[in-house]
Structure formats: structure tokens, C-alpha cells
């Protein structure tokens, strides 16, 4: 299972085929977690389910060809952020279904735990860093699909002003791989522990 490649290319899908077209049509880059993957929050209505986007197989084509097949003007949201997937419309798409579902499950766990931590909140999947989260009292709580520091999806607590202490194990706060937090209750407990430490 190639989590790194699948994560990078799903990040490209989120950015080039979903957030970009949605921003141009509806003025927002926000995405959301849905069963099996992630989706837009406004028009155009698009959803990833495993290795499919709106019913089209992701692998075996380019981002540009997928955009054309869906009737979209592909490309990242212009001028909103500097980081991103690093992929372009001419790149071939490579998504493994098993890895895609691992990432989707991570977002689902983060979404469920965030809603329990802050009832009434609406977790957002952001296309810039491909992570899902909420912000409470200048603290970000969420799940990342993974990055250079951790290949697998991980939960994080990111205070705007990171404190010191053994709980805080990364430069931006605290992070735990989801292999160590296998369910919603465990992710929620991690979020709650970070929140409690910050209240002291």
C-alpha cells in the first residue's frame, strides 16, 4: 500500500479538481469529509469515494483529462495560498483504493471527534495542507492525511502559541499517528487532553 503517493495525489484532486473549481464557481475552498472520502460544500457538487471522483476512476489519466471529463475548469484556487500538492493538470493521477480508504477513515475519525469536542462545530477539510479540523480558542484540532514528518494520517492539537511539555511533541503542538488512536473515542481523548492542558 502506497500511502504517500495516494495522499499526494488525493491532495491534488482536492486542490485542482474540487477546491479550485468550487472557488471559481462558489467563492469557497472549503471541503468536507464524507463516507469513503471527501466532497465539496458548494457547486460544483463533487465527491471522492475511494479511488473514484464523481464515478470516474482517478488512476490512469491526468488531472486535466479528469477535469475535462467532468466539464470543469481545473486548477488550484488562484492566489489564496503558497503551499499545496505540488501537482499540475498535466500530471498523471495515481491513487490506490486501499490507501484512499485509510485516508478517508482518518478524516472521518477527525470529523466525528471534532464534533464531539465542540458540538455544533463544522469541521473543514482544507485543500492547502490536506487536513481536516476546527479552531477553538486559538487552538486547531484535527486530522492530517499525513506529510513529510508522518506518512500515515495523524491527529493533531495545534495551539497558535505552542507551549512546552511532554505532550507537545512537534513544533506546532502535538501529533499522534492514528495507528495509536484507532477510534473516535481515542481521537477525542487526545483532543480533550490537549485542551485540558492548555486550560491550566
Image (spheres, helix red, strand yellow):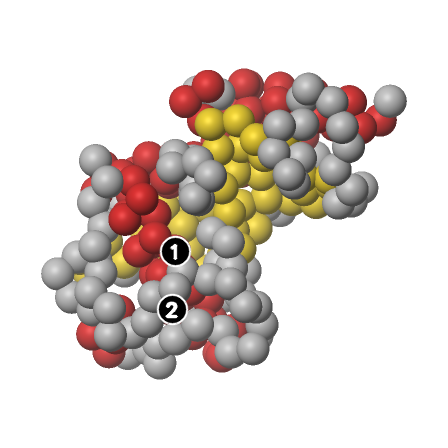
**Residue 16 shown left or right of residue 98 in the figure:** right
Displayed quadrant of residue 103: top left
**Residue 93 shown left or right of residue 123 in the figure:** left
Residue occupying image coordinates x 46% and y 39%: 149
Q: Is residue 7 above or below residue 156?
A: below
Q: Is residue 141 above or below residue 84?
A: above
For disc 1, the marked residue is 11
Return the mark for residue 188: none
Give the number of callouts: 2
Residue 66 visible in the current orientation = no
For disc 2, the marked residue is 16
Displayed quadrant of residue 167: top right
Q: Secondary structure at mark 1?
A: helix
Q: Percent position (x, y) of residue 55? A: 22, 58
148 or 59: which is nearer to us?
Answer: 148
Residue occupying image coordinates x 47% and y 52%: 130
Instruction: Give the CA separation, mark 1 to mark 2.
Output: 8 Å
Q: Secondary structure at mark 2?
A: helix
Amino acid at each position: 500500500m502506497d500511502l504517500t503517493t495516494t495522499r499526494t495525489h488525493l491532495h491534488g484532486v482536492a486542490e485542482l479538481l474540487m477546491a479550485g473549481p468550487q472557488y471559481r464557481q462558489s467563492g469557497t475552498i472549503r471541503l468536507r469529509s464524507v463516507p469513503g472520502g471527501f466532497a465539496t460544500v458548494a457547486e460544483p457538487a463533487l465527491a471522492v469515494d475511494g479511488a473514484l471522483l464523481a464515478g470516474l476512476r482517478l488512476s490512469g489519466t491526468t488531472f486535466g483529462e479528469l477535469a475535462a471529463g467532468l466539464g470543469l475548469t481545473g486548477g488550484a484556487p488562484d492566489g489564496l495560498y503558497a503551499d499545496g500538492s505540488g501537482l499540475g493538470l498535466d500530471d498523471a493521477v495515481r491513487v490506490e483504493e486501499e490507501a484512499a480508504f485509510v485516508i478517508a477513515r482518518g478524516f472521518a475519525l477527525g470529523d466525528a471527534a471534532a464534533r464531539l469536542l465542540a458540538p455544533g462545530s463544522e469541521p473543514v477539510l482544507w485543500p492547502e495542507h490536506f487536513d481536516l479540523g476546527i479552531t477553538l480558542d486559538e487552538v486547531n484540532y484535527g486530522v492530517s492525511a499525513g506529510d513529510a514528518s508522518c506518512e500515515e494520517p495523524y491527529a493533531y492539537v495545534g495551539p497558535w502559541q505552542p507551549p512546552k511539555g511532554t505532550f507537545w511533541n512537534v513544533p506546532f503542538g502535538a501529533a499522534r499517528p492514528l495507528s495509536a488512536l484507532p477510534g473516535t473515542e481515542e481521537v477525542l481523548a487526545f483532543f480533550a487532553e490537549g485542551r485540558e492542558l492548555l486550560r491550566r
